[in-house]
Image (cartoon, helix red, strand yellow):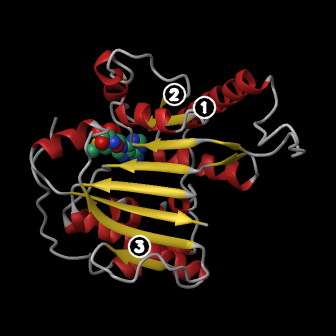
Amino acid sequence: MPGANSVTSNQETLHKDLEEVVRKYARTTFLRPIADHTREAFAEVEEFVKKFYDARNNGSPPRCSEDDKRDVTAPVAVILDSGCGTGESTIHIARRFPGIPVIGIDKSCARLNKAGNPSQTAGEDVPSNAFWIRAELLDFWRLALDHVRSGQWTIPYHAVYYPNPWPKQSEATRRFHMHPIFPTLLALGETIELRTNWEIYAREFAEAARIAAKELNGSPTLRFEDDERGDSHSGTGKTIKCESFDPENPETAFERKYKEAGQKLWRTIIKTE
Ligand SMILES: C[S@@+](CC[C@H](N)C(=O)[O-])C[C@H]1O[C@@H](n2cnc3c(N)ncnc32)[C@H](O)[C@@H]1O
């Protein structure tokens, strides 16, 4: 696997165009036509989600309690593991959220073919709420957001673990947070967790979220780990935290490689209240 080396870049701090690019895209809609294969993949995911809840609830959406009189068309919870690679994180997340379908999405057939293999499950069954699908994220995310906006889905947690960092300054607009897709990604998840082995990527992602949220809503709270102010809320409904972390049990193939190589890992967590 490539990637056990530290990220090398001709960029030493946040990209000089970050604010301009993020602000430009904050109010625009990414209009590239959605590929048919991702529409078909999305339909497979819808089917999995429906069957999962049908099996658990005899055909009704999940209810909080016997007394819960919610409309039967209430949104169902779905968790996304975007760019899941070989899918190991999907299994960890599915175990963390056993009552919610967890969808691992990746465009690489070769990587997805390894999902759920015995080395990932430590001899246990693949959790029944884990599902993998081959799809293009830039398209899948827009279909998912349509489902959120139409009240069919809620996304309590969205994992974006170790995306390609595109470290060359000249390739920066391929980073998710400097791409026109970013407002869509930012709207997909009550909690979004980005993990990376490149500090600049984590800090840029956090700053991009702050810029985009400010452009759209006002001024969100941004907290770095060396910041004493804590998680206060400023009324925009978003809290953004950027910190280094040391996973005791790595949850992805890349995470394990980076940890074994002694690299510092970073995460940005964006919460929408
Ligand atoms: C560096 S790997 C990390 C994989 C996994 N999250 C891990 O930590 O082991 C990035 C993954 O994102 C996938 N990916 C990148 N861009 C994508 C896109 N636009 N649509 C779908 N998958 C994408 C790649 O195929 C690759 O598996």
Q: Position of residue 198 (x, y in %)?
A: 21, 60
> With 103 as the anchor, is 170 left or right in this view?
left
Can residue 123 be seen from the camera position used here?
yes
Can residue 3 be seen from the camera position used here?
no
Q: Residue type at mark 1?
A: Val
Q: Residue type at mark 2?
A: Phe
Q: Position of residue 189 (x, y in %)?
A: 56, 55
Mark 1 sits near ligand 1, with its Cβ under 8 Å away: no
Mark 2 sits near ligand 1, with its Cβ under 8 Å away: no
Q: Position of residue 142 (x, y in %)?
A: 59, 51
Q: Which residue is mark 2?
A: 131
Helix, strand or loop for disc 3: helix
Quadrant location of residue 266? bottom left
Helix, strand or loop for disc 1: helix
Quadrant holding the C terminus? bottom right
Query: At x 20% / y 61%, what residue is drawn?
Result: 167
Few, some or many C-alpha atoms within 10 Å of disc 3 (few <14, some 14-19, many ≥20)?
A: many
Query: At x 57% / y 71%, what residue is drawn?
Result: 28
* Depicted 210 relative to depicted 171: above or below: below
Instruction: Determine which of the numbered discs, if any, sits on residue 208 in the image.
Output: 3
Q: Which residue is mark 1?
A: 45
How many angstroms separate mark 3 from mark 2 (CA)? 30 Å
Helix, strand or loop for disc 2: strand
How many angstroms separate mark 3 from mark 1 (CA)? 29 Å
